[in-house]
Image: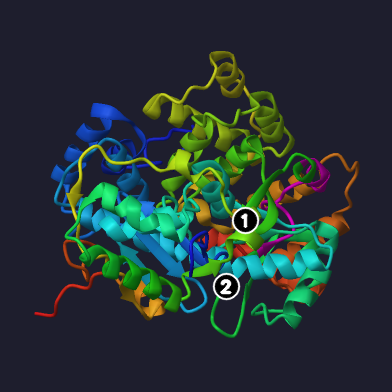
Amino acid sequence: MGNGDYLKINEPNIVHENIDGETVILNLDSGNYYSVVNVGADIWTYIEKGVPVSEILPLIRNNYECSPGDEENAVNSFITQLKQEGLVIAVEGKSDDSLLPQNWKDQITVKSSKAAFDIPVLSKYTDMKDLLLLDPIHEVDATGWPSIKPSE
Amino acid sequence: MNTINPGYCDLATPHQELLLKAALLSGQESITAWRNWQDSADWEGYLEPGSFRLLPLLYTNLQKQDVSDPAMGKLKGIYRQAWSKNQTLFHEMAKVVDVLQQAGIKTMLLKGASLSLLYYKNNGARPMADIDVLVPLKQARLTTELLQKAGWTSSVPLSEQDITYGHAIQLSNHQGKEFDLHWRPFNGCRDEYEKDFWDNALPVKMANIHSLAPNPTDMLFHVIIHGVVWNPVPPIRWIADALTLINSADFKIDWQRLIGLARKHHLCLRLKTGLQYLQEKFSAPIPPDVMMTIINLRVSYLEKIEYRFMIGSRETENSGPYAAFCCHLCRFRRLNAGRGVVSVFTFSRSLQWRLNARHSGDLLYKGIRIAANMFVAKPLQVRHR
């Protein structure tokens, strides 16, 4: 994918919400549930706001303290994973610009201080049917549903 | 609550009120209520289902107040689960709504779906067990036929009497998914109200499908009349729903319309009880002149009997056959108000439907049983839907 290409959230079958800094994503067709935080949540926000793929890495470098070279592989690998899971789809810039927000620069804020870069992780939970039946008070750990309490 | 006097002492327990305040108020009031609620019971040990359904809203409100507490992790998880369940329901029901709209049948989302999408503006704060879809009365039959072809069936076939005297039916598919199909917005809703209800509806979008939602005033009316009733699961979330509607910055309640609806449908007592409670316990901003009008609304004897029946537990004396009969009479009157003289025959047909009587002889037999039961106080099975 060259400069000027975008990624688009694969709606309407993919729904997502940012809950207190964590992005939760649900694939309504497969029933898979995903969670991303920190760098991963920022990348998701950039995709949602229509940031070109070529601009994602510079934004990450502006917002996080990165070791040279490490962040590029991590970010590319994360984006590849999002595509493989069918959560985002590639959009050719010239043909589909009308589908994307044009004013992404107005919507993205650069953080006042840089945080430490951590490798973005796409946490995946399958078998939504069972997860939805889980008792979210007694069968989960302290971080809450869908993290199941380890068996004693 | 066994008195005709519409007291509100047990619309919610003091413990439930603490939770409601923690979930609905802002600033220190919310935080204090949250601490007191936590201190007054071990909610992680046991929590009754009515309170449990408020926890996603509690999470969103505590998060707004920047509350830091070890319990926030679990509350966040409860919110995540409610969000996921709601999204799954929206996705499933959008397919149903699409089938109907493709066939030219208008749809309206009642209760939780519209509240969540339009009024809470949050897909996780207001959990739902299922979704309620309203179609025009004249298209109820066509709707069930279409949905049957799409794999949605009811446990008993929908009869003409069900359409004439009832208001909704539960449909399910082979995957065990369920939803409620309504052809009247609520039980005993006057048919004359239908056009007005549809004409004043607002657009709403569910999973990329456009449908309609009741306007805020009609929604508030429904929330209160459905909330101020007895239910095995304490229906306290009506309080959160009603306050969300009344306090909405984007929508205004048409109080005169609300009063008019209560008068037309002989539901003044439930409206009065609900609004008085909201104002006195949660300082709901109801204009004083409106409150005065509502307090002075005339309430008929039949409505009082119906109120007793609706508000009392089904195990109390108020659930007996006499109360059930009055309740049916009240709903029948509501359905037929303004139609001039309604024949005894029409009433007996509706009673036949209510009592599941197969024919007039069966109705007579069941009528005698009702009379006998009045003396021996044995409950008779009647339709509560």
Image mark 1: chain = A
- Residue A125 is one of the magenta-drawn residues: no
Q: Quadrant of residue B345?
A: bottom right
Residue B46 appears in the figure: yes
Tell me, for residue B178, which label it has, or none.
Answer: 2
In the rendered structure, which segment of residues is drawn in magenta?
A: B181-196
User: Circle 2 — which element?
Assistant: strand
* Three-letter code, disc 2: Glu
In the image, residue A68 above or below residue B297: below
Q: Nearer the viewer, residue B90 or B266?
A: B90
Residue appearing at x 71%, y 80% in the figure = B150
Residues at marks 2 and 1, CA–CA distance in whole angstroms: 40 Å
Which chain's residue wears label 2?
Answer: B
User: Is residue B186 part of the magenta span, yes or no?
Assistant: yes
How far from the left and from the top, in percent, is residue B38?
Answer: 17, 45
| Residue shown at 75% from the left, 39% from the top | B200
Image quadrant in which the C terminus of chain B is located: bottom right
